[in-house]
Image (tube, rainbow, N blue to C red):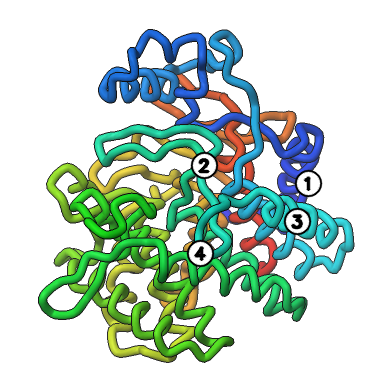
Amino acid sequence: MSISKKNLLQSIEKLDNWITKNDWKAYDPFDGLSSDMLNILTFNNHYLRIALQQTVRRFPVNVRPFIGIKKNTSSKGMGFCALGYLKLYQATKNNEYLEKMHLCLDWLIQNFSEGYSGYCWGNHFSYEARGGKIPLGVPTIVWTSLIANVFLDAFEYLNERKYFDIAKSAGDFIVNDIGRHEEPDGTICFMYTPQNKNNPTEDGLVHNSNVLGASLLARTSQHAKDENFESLAKKSINYTLKYQLPDGGWYYGEPNKFRWVDSFHTGYVLESIYGYMKATNDMENEAKLIKGYKYFKSTFFGENGTPRYYNHKTYPIDIQCASQGIQTLVNLREYDATSIETAEKVALWTIKNMQHPEGYFYFRKYPGITNKTPMFHWGQATMLSGLAHLYAII
């Protein structure tokens, strides 16, 4: 069953109204360490801090208001909102969407991480996991690349030079501040953060973050004619292509502790490789991209459009898998004639099963229970972008 353009726009408008009414603020799945009330009980112990963060994230109801965690605006959320508004403006020529895009990009210009070689962005909370620590405000290559790519989109559509200058500046941050792991064959993997720049560790060997950085460098080089950017992008892309699994997918990262395959990180990898190829016209490994996309499409969506989290199981049904799934299906549609049909099924299932009557989308569904916490970037912003991508082409 497909979704009508009218019903799709109604869902988008309800979501946009909720986002606007809440002043672009909500919670984040990983904001558990923002609780001063409970943080003192961790005694600054890494494993206790991970436990606190994951308990808040996985608890089936939203405990944040009771432990002092406030709604906030996230940089990645504003980036995805800006992208969604740009797509909606392209499709409708409604100036209200253009104004909201400018609002989001202006916020990002004013709220970047200072002290680095260029524009960059990080979390508004501290984060700790098995991969290490990312203190509040420390920029990541993921946040920075996703956001800077939106500035490039705005530049390419509106021809506003300042947006290109910001994207190029973010590329300088990646080249100058992010460490690199180099393999004997000359391929490289960009690290996740500027930490340990001169001593890269295996914790940084993550595929989606690596190729997100490469895609930004390639797209920027397309306009700036920067041979260094393009050369580094090629080495980075080739690193991840080298580690493609026989079935077409990728582990989250190469260390043993990162050996899982999930939906939305696979979507990031595919879109980044696709963006690199389109920017550079380097189509040497297009067959690997197509293989990866066919694996993604056949693995992570049920027949009725249910988005699946992992390659081996469906639950938890996570809103990020739905939003990134729709966007990737739209953007790589040239590789499979049924891509848009699948994207429509995912959108329809998600709107029916995970959108609240007020307009926001739920965080997760588990067997028998739904966590209805409204997350900002992880749900509202990414769904605005995903649905806008779909609306623009149906």
Mark 4 residue element: loop
Relative to 286, 11 lies left or right: right
Which of pointers 4 and 2 lies earlier in the amino acid sequence?
A: 4
Q: Earlier in the sequence, mark 2 or mark 1?
A: 1
Residue 223 pos. (x, y %): 58, 87
182 or 2, nearer to the observer: 182
Where residue 210 appears, as percent x and y from the top left, is: 34, 63
> At label 1, which amino acid type do we have?
Glu
Place of residue 152 in the rendered image (x, y in percent of width and height, measured from the top left): 62, 72
Q: Nearer the viewer, residue 124 or 270?
A: 124
Q: Cα distance, mark 3 to mark 2?
A: 18 Å
Residue to which mark 2 is pinned: 137
Q: Earlier in the sequence, mark 1 or mark 3?
A: 1
Distance, label 4 to label 2, CA atoms, is 15 Å
The alpha-carbon separation of the residues under discs 3 and 4 comes to 20 Å
> Could you say which disc has been placed on residue 117 in the image?
4
Q: Which mark is residue 106?
A: 3
Residue 4 in view (yes/no):
no
How many numbered marks, from 0 up?
Answer: 4
Read off the residue under disc 1.
13
Q: Earlier in the sequence, mark 3 or mark 2?
A: 3
At horizontal 70% and vertical 65% (from top left) the residue drawn is 87
Which one is nearer the viewer's eye here, 251 or 323?
251
Mark 2 vs mark 1, CA separation in Å: 32 Å
- Residue at mark 4 to residue at mark 1: CA–CA distance: 38 Å
Q: Earlier in the sequence, mark 3 or mark 4?
A: 3
The amino acid at mark 4 is Ser
